[in-house]
Amino acid sequence: MGSSFKILGSGAGPGVPSFFCECRGCREARLDGRHCRTRSGALLRTDARSYLIDTSPDLRFQLLQEQLDSIDGIFLTHWHYDHFGGLGEMEYYVKLDRKEPIPLYLPPTAVDSFRAAFTYLQDILDPQPWEFATTYNLGHLGITPLPANHGVETAGFLIESEKAKLAYFPDTSGLPEATKVKMNAIDWLICDATFSDFNWFPDSHMSMSEAIELGQSVGAKKTVLTHMAIHYSKPVTVAELECRLTDVPNVLLAYDGMQFNLLRGVR
């Protein structure tokens, strides 16, 4: 069976377009749906099983887009609303179809927050605190939470097959040295590029240029910029972002639906 990683959402907290915003980036997205960005999340598929990485408030739309009819597990990077807000979408799937709780791997410090916020999901989701640097075996893939820099306890996930290595860090400000060590021979680094220009939150996020520099520093074969909020600071369009990358090798803009083959790697 194939193994793949797909970006379900490539936007930051406000999404693109935002309902309240008329900047040129949001206007571009309203005119051309290809430039819309739902809130960040990803889908990992292997051995005919499907795992979510984060559950954004846009999850229902994302699942319908992918025509998914089953979820076998959920991994959360951290406990911020734009990354966990879609958990409630699992309620009726479990009650009406699956009939058993879904494993929910989440930060140890988020377990109490989950129980307090979602009292009605206690028989829907089975919270299991992940451990940094512990690899969870998902058939032909391994997924390992590694520390990120984001204020609250946050992981990125290193996903490995026999042929490829992919790291997903949608919310981070650089990477701790211990995490960088694990990036050796990484095929794809998919990382936080929240800000197109000036970084408002340097302790939590990265700008586009900082993300590119991070990819170069760890020797990533390809760096993919995600979690983008194109109307923070100076609004920018996708066309302008792509123009900036014309002469920057091995750097790509993420988009909703972007897929990576984990049985092949970068060639």
Image (tube, rainbow, N blue to C red):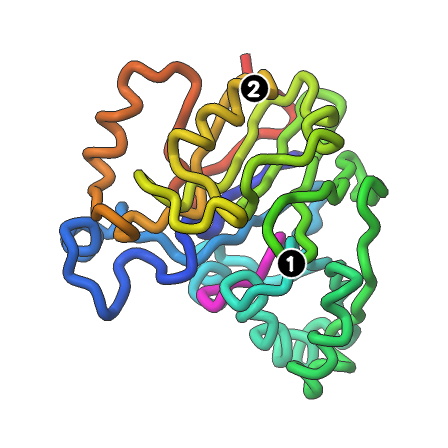
Q: Residue at x 22, y 26 (%)?
A: 243
Taking depth in this image into account, of 2 and 150 the one nearest to the observer is 150
Instruction: Inspect the magenta stretch and tell me whether residue 245 lies in it.
Output: no
Q: Residue at x 53, y 47 (%)?
A: 203
Label ID, residue 210: none
According to the image, label 1 marks what residue? 152
Q: Is residue 178 above or below residue 123?
A: above
Q: Main secondary structure of the magenta part?
A: loop
Spot occupied by residue 221 in the image (x, y as percentages of width and height): 54, 17
Left-right relation of 69 to 32: right
Distance CA(mark 2)–CA(mark 1): 24 Å
Taking depth in this image into account, of 167 and 90 the one nearest to the observer is 167
Q: Is residue 102 visible?
A: yes
Left-right relation of 20 to 212: left
Comes first in the chain, label 2 or label 1 = 1
Disc 2 element: helix
According to the image, label 2 marks what residue? 217
Q: Is residue 187 above or below residue 156?
A: above
Quadrant of the rendered image containing residue 129? bottom right
Q: Looking at numbered disc 2 in the image, what kind of residue is underneath it?
A: Ser
Q: Residue at x 33, y 41 (%)?
A: 198
Spot occupied by residue 241 in the image (x, y as percentages of width and height): 26, 33
Left-right relation of 138 to 177: right
Taking depth in this image into account, of 30 and 25 the one nearest to the observer is 25
Disc 1 element: loop
**Region in magenta:** 53-59
Spot occupied by residue 36 in the image (x, y as percentages of width and height): 29, 52
Q: Residues within 10 Å of mark 1 (few under 14, many from 20)?
A: some
